[in-house]
Amino acid sequence: MLTIAYFYRYIVTDSIQYILLSIVGVYLFSFLLLISLTTFALLSDENTFSVAVKNSYRWVIHNPLHCIVVIFASGVLVFVGIVSIVGLVIIIPAVLFSFHLEVIQNSSTLTAEKDNF
């Protein structure tokens, strides 16, 4: 909400500082969203909360391409869910969670394989 307020102030005042604050807000929101999504996926593997947060932070900073894929795929799935009321409540959360879990497990397997060589 604060990011939208900064963007509105930029439109009204045409000041660069407000657009910069808006961009930083979007980046920070996206980063925290990715960490929380991966934390939930790692918590489903029976990790403790602190271990899950630490590993999800590491995963986000070491897998930028996977993060972009997760952001765009999540955006598309949320858009499809908004179109469908049933999808928004039942189908989309299950598909999103399964997708995030699959991306994290596949990239963790690839990272483990690279470490062995």
Image (spheres, grey):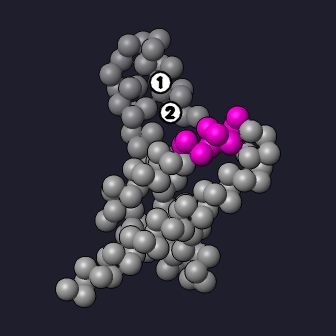
**Residue 47 in the image, given as x and y percentages of width and height:** 56, 82
Mark 2 lies on a secondary structure that is helix
**Residue 44 in the image, given as x and y percentages of width and height:** 62, 76
- Report the number of numbered marks: 2
**Does the magenta segment cover residue 79?**
yes
Residue 116: image quadrant is: bottom left
Task: Name the residue type under label 1.
Answer: Phe
Residue, x 68% and y 55% (percent of image)? 93
**Does the magenta segment cover residue 27?**
no
- Name the image quarter holding the C terminus: bottom left
- Name the image quarter holding the N terminus: top right
Residue, x 39% and y 39% (percent of image)? 24
Mark 1 lies on a secondary structure that is helix
Q: Which mark is residue 3?
A: 2
Which of these two is toward me, 31 or 80?
80
* Residue placed under numbered mark 1 in the picture: 7
Which of these two is toward me, 96 or 5?
96
Would residue 34 be seen by someone viewing this image from the given angle?
yes
**Residue 61 in the image, given as x and y percentages of width and height:** 34, 62
**Is 113 located above or below residue 94 in the figure?**
below
> In the image, 102: left or right of 110?
right
Residue, x 33% and y 82% (percent of image)? 112
Task: Name the residue type under label 2.
Answer: Thr
Callout 2 environment at 10 Å: few (<14), some (14 to 19), or many (20+)? some
Q: Are marks 2 and 1 in contact (CB under 8 Å)?
A: yes
Q: Main secondary structure of the magenta part?
A: helix
Would residue 39 be seen by someone viewing this image from the given angle?
no
**Residue 70 in the image, given as x and y percentages of width and height:** 47, 53
Residue 107: image quadrant is: bottom left
Q: Which mark is residue 93?
A: none
Region of the chain picked out in magenta, as a range: 75-83
